[in-house]
Amino acid sequence: MSGEDIDGKAVAATIRGELKERVSSLRSPPGLAVILVGSRRDSQTYVRMKKKACEEVGIQSFGFDYPDTVTEDELLQKIAELNSDDKVHGILVQLPLPKHINEDSIIEAVHPTKDVDGLHPRNNAALCSTGTHVGAEKVDWADLSSVPFHIPCTPQGCIELLDRSGVELKGKNAVVIGRSNLVGLPVAMLLMHRDATVTIVHSKTTDAPGVVGRADVVVAAVGRAEMVKKEWIKEGAVVIDVGINSVDDASAKRGYRLVGDVDYAGCKEVASKITPVPGGVGPMTIAMLLRNTVNSCVRSGATKGE
Amino acid sequence: MSGEDIDGKAVAATIRGELKERVSSLRSPPGLAVILVGSRRDSQTYVRMKKKACEEVGIQSFGFDYPDTVTEDELLQKIAELNSDDKVHGILVQLPLPKHINEDSIIEAVHPTKDVDGLHPRNNAALCSTGTHVGAEKVDWADLSSVPFHIPCTPQGCIELLDRSGVELKGKNAVVIGRSNLVGLPVAMLLMHRDATVTIVHSKTTDAPGVVGRADVVVAAVGRAEMVKKEWIKEGAVVIDVGINSVDDASAKRGYRLVGDVDYAGCKEVASKITPVPGGVGPMTIAMLLRNTVNSCVRSGATKGE
Ligand SMILES: NC(=O)C1=CN([C@@H]2O[C@H](COP(=O)(O)OP(=O)(O)OC[C@H]3O[C@@H](n4cnc5c(N)ncnc54)[C@H](OP(=O)(O)O)[C@@H]3O)[C@@H](O)[C@H]2O)C=CC1
Ligand SMILES: NC(=O)C1=CN([C@@H]2O[C@H](COP(=O)(O)OP(=O)(O)OC[C@H]3O[C@@H](n4cnc5c(N)ncnc54)[C@H](OP(=O)(O)O)[C@@H]3O)[C@@H](O)[C@H]2O)C=CC1
């Protein structure tokens, strides 16, 4: 058996196309404010990619760049301003922030309805709840794009990939490797909301290969290059690899190449479906950020009469 | 093998004793406000038990009883008043509320620091996070009584019972049956924070007996009388039974008796430790409510100079 690739690049492009169409029917464009602090190369790259993706689908992006020396108060003030700016439907603060700034305070300052990264405690509490409603609004987990609060982008992207690949989750055994607030834990919650029986594996798990071996669906979000081996995977399982790790490779132009948390070549031999790295989960993250921003705009009512 | 009973009644009494001592060293007593709406028999009983337990440990309880016809606004106003009352360190609204009142609004109105039931989204978000801090305060999951926010009482009681029975959780396979916001999901989070490998089982799980059969620790919170059978339990596992179900029993004085979600007699033959029903988890819920209230008082600083 050789598993089918789940083509995240193609799925993300399709979603961007759908969003573009949706945006074109709105009275005024959705707006995303992007706050970048300092001169980290990787952060600059991510911000550039996000702004470019906004442009592609017709979201207006507003960039706010600050030096490393910016104070927490200055950022809080800017966020307060953006919270009450009707042209701004999403506020993204590129993480990590310099050490002298409390990330939690910044995250909590963003109004939950504009928290398109889904990191605000309100949004986390809504995700980590089996209640049927958030406030007066019903939650329909079957359609994540309809959920009346913001779900973190990478986890949302994982489920969207599964959905668009026709993978049924209800009643399936799902194992998530990793329990970070950014990826592992929210993915586990989403799989649970989809009625999978979820097991969360982490660094203190004693028999990870055994646990993973019983999974119909495996999501790896660990940060360890090619940790998940062929022998771990049950024949026919679906494998979602969130990991992005750079490993030395003298034969590569830049001296390194990117690999996931899964030994792709090996696992592909037993899996029924598998995401490659790069080109799997990666492109979905930005697509979900765009979707959250468009949803936020529609929900704000700024687009009544669309 | 015949499993040892975990005696929740005795453990709860010990904890009340510890709290009493702690309270006696405070400058002024902790205060718990208890809001009761309507005339449900069970709610009245719970409220009475809670007030009585407060008295025993030296917590001042303030009762506010309302008829079924009370408006949401009246309750919200009372809660606002209690939020800013320095003598009140915990506010408990006995659930369920009549249908015309939005429970979520009421729960969210209670200030998170006084939300001794641990139901406010802020407290839920803190529980469902693997961050090391809440605000500036470090979270030490090893000692739940030190955690700087409120953890729901029944789930907290389950872990406390395990702790006081010398059950090691790190690296163990734990299975929680049930995923309610009140019990199942928070228990799963707590077990995860204690570094168990956690699986959440629910009504859509296809092979519950198989999944439970791999568990070193089983927590049942389902609401189905004696659903968990001896054959499900791995030899030597620890079984925590949260369920409280009344079943008809002509031989009993009141015509019914209370049983858990676990077939106690059968499972006791294979488990190493097991909680009886009644007398297991039940008494722990109120003990944890008292502890949350005392902690809230100490954290409020009202007791500086203790
Ligand atoms: N595609 C995308 O857009 C994104 C990709 N990523 C990538 O996903 C990966 C995970 O990211 P993130 O969640 O932020 O990472 P974190 O470092 O925050 O979390 C890693 C998790 O993996 C667990 N872990 C570590 N070692 C092991 C082990 N040997 N066995 C089992 N579990 C282990 C840790 O457990 P413990 O809690 O016990 O320490 C922790 O929960 C990274 O490679 C990252 O680059 C991240 C975000 C977006
Ligand atoms: N000791 C104490 O102080 C307390 C005791 N309790 C008792 O604990 C029990 C659970 O309470 P609570 O969590 O509030 O109940 P809920 O009804 O809110 O939740 C029950 C959970 O059990 C799951 N479930 C139902 N049937 C099955 C099944 N056949 N197999 C597997 N899972 C199933 C449900 O799954 P799904 O989500 O798919 O519907 C749901 O997640 C009750 O007996 C209650 O009386 C509760 C609170 C305090």
Image (cartoon, coloured by chain):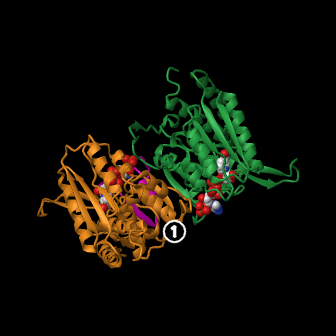
Chain colours: A green, B orange
Rendering coords of residue B96 (x, y %)? 27, 49
Rendering coords of residue A27 (x, y %)? 56, 21
Q: Which chain carries label 1?
A: B
Classify residue B217 as left or right of residue A264: left
**Ligand 1 falls in which quarter?**
bottom right
Residue visible at 31% across and 71% down? B29
* Residue A237 in view here: no
Image quadrant holding the C terminus of chain B, namely bottom left
Q: Which amino acid does label 1 sit on?
A: Asp
Rendering coords of residue A172 (x, y %)? 50, 47
The residue segment tinted magenta is B202-224
Circle 1 sits in a helix, a strand or a loop, which is it? Answer: loop
For the image, the number of numbered tags is 1
* Residue B132 in view here: yes
Image quadrant holding the N terminus of chain B, namely bottom left
Is residue B221 in the magenta section? yes
Rendering coords of residue B149 (x, y %)? 45, 62
Give residue A272's quadrant in the image. Answer: top right
Residue closer to the observer: B69 or B174: B69
Residue visible at 86% across and 49% down? A254
Residue visible at 66% across and 47% down? A94
Query: What secondary structure is the magenta-colored segment mainly?
Result: loop
Q: How crowded is mark 1: few (under 14 residues within 10 Å), some or many (20 or more)?
A: some
Is residue A170 in the magenta section? no
Residue closer to the observer: A32 or A195: A32
Residue at numbered disc 1: B140
Classify residue A45 as left or right of residue A114: right
